[in-house]
Image (spheres, rainbow, N blue to C red):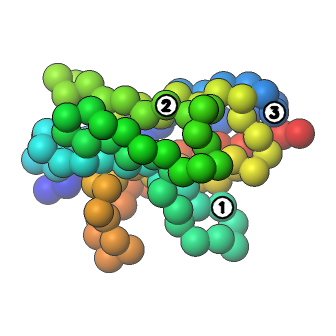
Amino acid sequence: QVQLVESGGGLVQAGGSLRLSCAASGSIFRFTAMAWFRQAPTKQRELVAAITGGGSTNYADSVKGRFTISRDIAKNTVYLQMNNLKPEDTAVYYCNKRTASASDYWGQGTQVTVSS
């Protein structure tokens, strides 16, 4: 059974930082490219950052230079360090396998709110 538990969200002022964590079940995590997604009100879910099993990363243009994705295989955990946050980063953040679709299992997400 796949399990994804996101945490670390909160309310922060513009320019601040947050570190999100995602605890994933071993079967999905160890050999799978993982990603962070976000969904703002009235918008579609979008990919924010991804990391392969080998550690290669890629980012949405809107977060390049501000967000960093990483993973700890021993802890089955994926992280998203978010710096210089902007109000437009406000959304619910989810982690999942890079290729997850809407019909796949999704965790509850973690709310990030950035005030101006």
Residue denoted by label 1:
40
Q: Mark 2 points at which residue?
A: 68
Q: Earlier in the sequence, mark 3 or mark 2?
A: 3
| Circle 3 SS class | loop
| Type of the residue with mark 2 | Thr
Look at discs 3 and 2 and give the one toward the viewer: 2
Which of the labelled discs sits on residue 14, or is there none?
A: 3
Query: Is the residue 67 above or below the residue 4 in the image?
Result: above
The residue positioned 52% from the left and 62% from the top of the image is 46
State how far apart marks 3 and 2 are (Cα).
17 Å
Instruction: Tell me which numbered mark, 2 or 1, is placed earlier along the sequence.
Output: 1
Whichever of callouts 1 and 3 sits on the residue coming sooner in the sequence is 3
Residue at (62%, 32%) from the top-left corner?
Answer: 66
| Rendering coords of residue 16 (x, y %) | 73, 25
For this rendering, which residue is in front, 46 or 90? 46
For this orientation, the residue located farthest to the bottom is: 103
